[in-house]
Image (cartoon, grey):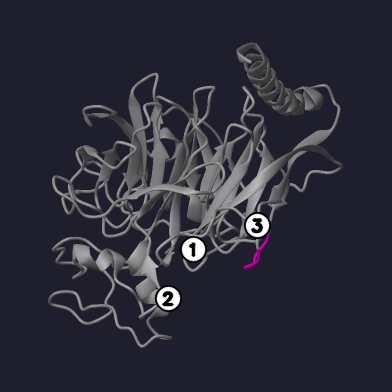
Amino acid sequence: MKRTRNFYVGVTIAAVVAVLAIAQYSLLSVARAQENGGGYKAGVYEVDRMWPKPLPNNWVLGATVGLAVDARDHVFIVHRGQSSLDQKFASQMSFTPPAPRGGRAGAAPAGGGFAAPSAGNTVTGYTASDMTKPISEFCCSAAPPVLEFDPAGNLVNHWGGPGTGFEWPPSMHGITIDGKDNVWLAGNGGHSVLKFSKDGKFLLQIGKNGASKGNKDTANVNRPAEVEVDMAANEVFVADGYGNRRVIVYDADKGTFKRMWGAYGKPPTDDPNVTYDPTKPLSTNWQTVHCATLANDGLVYVCDRANDRIQVFRRDGTYVKEQQIAKRTLGDGVTFDIAFSKDKQQSLMYVADGANHRVWQLLREPMLVLNHIGNGGRYPGQFYATHNVSLDSKGNLYTVETYTGARVQKFTYKGLSAVAKPEGNHN
């Protein structure tokens, strides 16, 4: 019996390895076919309507603003919870958010955005007990801020919120998982980056709320949007982009400053007069620095959201190139987040576009739009304010939606398909 069992286990493992090898080969064929003049190929995706499973305890999501996939293909999200629900349900349920201490009921926190729970926070007026306060008798309560799902969509862990020894941001934003399974969080309602174990044990805080002195301050961040970690260099890259206009790099263990840069690799500035006009030359400064995504080849792709552009740098901040997508888009802008395909060359590139409610699929070199995934709407497979995009090891694609989109979706990778004519960058 042991031999039979071992035989079946061996066959199963071999089959899994073979499937992964085929997927890897398929993605590699994208670059090779195009290099050899064989036309364009892009990924094909099908929304999984049953992913994730329903949340327990009458929990619901608020604005869903962070997404990461770890080495086990577990999906982590961060959302704004009670603060989003207060805004969403207040009018229809005659619910008024508690008044900030010294302010009026329903007032937004200083610096904009939603108010959010924090123990004793004098800006929002919430307490830790407000984190799960029901909106009505039977529905609903905000889920904890950080949720972890297994590949099947089961909720397997949850944590987050105010605690001892750190400052939980009034408004959350980005999440990433490093190679040691640590969870990094950025909050665009605060002035810090937080590092936790995967189970929510506090490890490190970079910056202090209310302490930022602007773009030249190397000890503090100012309403950061996203975080990524370079494990080989032990560095954390912060898209410090809501209050500042820079990428800033810290030691991932000590939180000590290493370097920073602004648009085109120049020193970041506090210029408040950056505006976007698609009929005029691009600004020499960034607006909302919304992501700083690390590629395997040592490049850093920076989302300059309101300018509808991506700028590319080496890890030391040396400027390489830039590209716009749908440059006539105004308002929030196009480039919310970036992810790459799982082949070694990362041939394909995915851009979450929250203004046009889609995910752009690009050939990474030369950042050419092949097609797009989804469009605006509330049905499965559609988007409302696409905020983040990420892929698992099998090439499956995940998205989260902010504002009232408030959900996470999975799109199963179905292989590659020829693209007769690239959609183009709409510029």
* Disc 2 residue crowd, few under 14, some 14–19, many 20+, Cα 10 Å: some
Q: Which element is circle 3 on?
A: loop
Q: Is residue 115 above or below residue 366?
A: below
Q: Main secondary structure of the magenta part?
A: loop
Q: Position of residue 283 (x, y in %)?
A: 48, 49
Q: Are marks 3 and 2 in contact (CB under 8 Å)?
A: no
Q: Answer with left or right where residue 149 lies relative to residue 2.
A: left
Please, is residue 2 above or below residue 31 in the view? above
First in sequence: mark 3 vs mark 2: 3
Tell me: 417 left or right of 309.
Answer: right
Whole-angstrom CA distance, mark 1 to mark 3, is: 16 Å
Residue at image position (49%, 56%) is 306
Asked where in the image residue 422 lies, by quadrant, the reply is top right
- Which residue carries the number 2 mark? 88
Whether 396 is drawn above or below 330: the answer is above
Give the residue at x 27% y 42%: 194
Q: Residue furthest front?
A: 1
Q: Which residue is mark 1?
A: 406
Going by the numbered disc 2, the residue's amino acid type is: Lys
Question: What is the secondary structure assignment of the residue under circle 2?
Answer: helix
Between 71 and 205, which is closer to the camera in this rendering?
71
Q: Which residues are magenta?
A: 375-379
**Nearer the viewer's eye, disc 1 or disc 3?**
3
Q: CA distance from mark 1 to mark 2?
A: 10 Å
Q: Nearer the viewer, mark 3 or mark 2?
A: 3
Front-most of 314 and 45?
A: 45
- The image quarter in which residue 59 lies: bottom left
88 in magenta: no
Residue 57 coordinates in the image, percent (x, y): 40, 64
For the residue marked with disc 3, what is the amino acid? Arg
